[in-house]
């Protein structure tokens, strides 16, 4: 009985669905216990695993990032990719999309800023560029977007009451919920979400333009860490309307960590109440 559906974020090309689900469940179980909330059986949870949709045909798994192409700052495409980089580098998350016109030196500086940050410590430049490119691919490659949405659709059941999306997973979950108002979802929980970034708004389906469009759920709870630059825009209510926004602290070194988010009392309370 799938009562809670998790949707992971960027990455996870070589991590299995089972391992990802276990990591999330253990964090949630700890958080519920710490907050003195009723436990949720692991059998009530399921993970939407789509990381391997980004794997190249014939690619072999590896524990490091050696499989990532030799990308550099100069490979970022002007427009969305440089605007998104600027947003997560805490340069200008509210900038008008497509109007930035960043010079090559500015793009290199933003990559170096992320390399020096605690969000992506010691990350190679190609890893950062690939991270941005993966978001862009989801938003622009129709077949890829459809495959990922199909995985969400095949996971949600008539028993599902709570959908939890982390990082890019909140974008996937948002689009799925908007496309399926017939789903009987009580609570939508977004953790470390980039949905408030203006550069994403026009590319969402449907576009988010501040008109208050939101999924047909009873409650939308958004939790953002003050240190998390992926969720540079901390409040989603001004963009989507009726959203309960909570600001927490995850610490600089684990600002975007799903375990920190799922052990927060704000996330646990939302999930527990959504399950009744």
Image: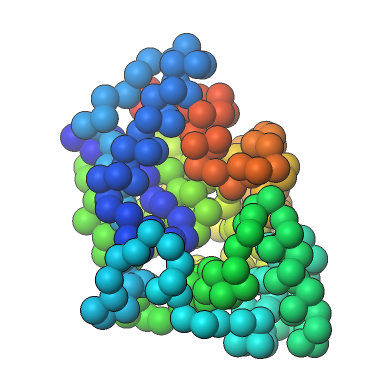
Compared to residue 216, the image places residue 69 above or below, namely below
| Residue 221 visible in the shown view | no
Compared to residue 99, the image places residue 194 above or below, namely above
Res. 56 image quadrant: bottom left
| Residue 259 visible in the shown view | yes
Res. 19 image quadrant: top left
Q: Position of residue 255 (x, y in %)?
A: 64, 44
Q: Position of residue 79 (x, y in %)?
A: 66, 84
In screen coordinates, is 2 left or right of 27?
left
* Residue at screen point 34% across, 64% down: 62
Res. 106 image quadrant: bottom right
Q: Position of residue 147 (x, y in %)?
A: 29, 70
* Residue at screen point 38% across, 15% down: 38
Please state, as top left, top right, bottom left or bottom right, where the N terminus lies in the image: top left
Compared to residue 97, the image places residue 165 above or below, namely above
- Way the structure is coloured: rainbow
Q: Position of residue 54 (x, y in %)?
A: 36, 72
- Nearest the camera: 11 or 262? 11
* Residue at screen point 60% across, 87% down: 75
* Residue at screen point 31% across, 38% down: 22
């Amino acid at each position: 009985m799938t009562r809670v559906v998790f949707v992971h974020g960027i990455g996870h090309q070589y991590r299995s669905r089972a391992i990802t689900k276990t990591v999330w469940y253990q964090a949630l179980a700890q958080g519920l216990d710490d907050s003195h909330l009723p436990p949720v059986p692991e059998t009530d949870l399921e993970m939407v695993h789509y990381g391997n949709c980004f794997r190249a045909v014939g690619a072999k798994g590896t524990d490091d990032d050696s499989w990532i192409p030799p990308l550099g700052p100069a490979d970022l495409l002007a427009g969305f990719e440089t605007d998104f980089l600027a947003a997560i580098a805490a340069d200008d998350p509210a900038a008008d999309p497509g109007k930035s016109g960043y010079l090559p030196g500015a793009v290199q500086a933003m990559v170096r800023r992320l390399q020096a940050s605690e969000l992506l410590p010691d990350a190679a430049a190609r890893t950062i560029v690939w991270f941005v490119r993966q978001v862009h691919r989801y938003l622009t490659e129709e077949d890829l977007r459809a495959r990922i949405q199909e995985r969400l659709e095949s996971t949600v059941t008539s028993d599902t009451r709570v959908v939890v999306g982390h990082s890019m997973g909140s974008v996937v979950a948002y689009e799925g919920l908007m496309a399926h108002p017939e789903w009987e979802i009580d609570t939508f929980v977004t953790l470390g979400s980039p949905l408030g970034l203006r550069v994403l708004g026009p590319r969402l389906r449907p576009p988010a333009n501040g008109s208050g469009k939101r999924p047909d759920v009873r409650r939308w709870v958004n939790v953002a860490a003050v240190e998390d630059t992926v969720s540079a825009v901390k409040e989603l209510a001004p963009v989507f309307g009726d959203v309960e926004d909570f600001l927490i602290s995850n610490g600089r070194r684990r600002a975007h960590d799903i375990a920190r988010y799922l052990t927060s009392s704000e996330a646990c309370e939302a999930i527990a109440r959504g399950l009744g």
